Image (cartoon, rainbow, N blue to C red):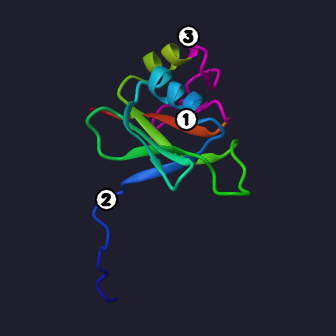
Amino acid sequence: MPATRTHFSRIGVVCIPVSDQDRSLDFYVGKLGLEKRSDVPFGGQYRWVEVAPAGKETGIAIVPPPPGSPTGGMQTGIALNTDDIDAVHADLKAQGVDVDAEVSRMGDGVPPLFWLRDPDENVLMVVEVEG
């Protein structure tokens, strides 16, 4: 089997199309505690808004959808990591974030996790990791 080359050095950003960038920015920063990395105009009428965990490299861009594409209800595939899932779940629930009713504990090999939904009902997963 021939050796493969890696052409990529990192995952830079993941985009989530949203219907209201200001509302989404309030959610991702105010409720989830991410930091705003950028909020700049681009392409005339658009804004590039990016958030990320403080001090971490990979971010989430909350952007308008391409013309003719819908927003909301996306399974984003994004997993947010925490070292205290019960505290995060309780905090988000207390803030009124749409989270699963309880943390899912599936047993050996599967870390505790739950799902949450942003204001556009895009789904993100929260997973407990050590350290």
Residue named by callout 3: 94
Disc sitting over residue 106 in the figure: 1
> Which residue extends farthest front?
44
What residue span does the magenta drawing correspond to? Answer: 93-120
- Residue closer to the observer: 81 or 53: 53
Q: CA gap, disc 1 to disc 2?
A: 30 Å
Secondary structure mostly seen in the magenta stretch: loop
Q: CA gap, disc 2 to disc 3?
A: 35 Å
Q: Secondary structure at mark 3?
A: helix
* Amino acid identity at mark 1: Met
Would residue 114 be seen by someone viewing this image from the given angle?
Answer: no
Q: Position of residue 78 (x, y in %)?
A: 50, 45
Check residue 124 for magenta coloring: no
Residue named by callout 2: 10
Q: Secondary structure at mark 1?
A: loop
* Amino acid identity at mark 3: Ala
Report the residue at 56% width, 46% height from top: 16
Label pair 2/3, CB-CB below 8 angstroms: no
| Mark 3 closeness class: few <14, some 14–19, many ≥20 residues within 10 Å | few
- Residue closer to the observer: 31 or 112: 31
Q: Nearer the viewer, mark 1 or mark 2?
A: 2
Q: Quadrant of the N terminus?
A: bottom left
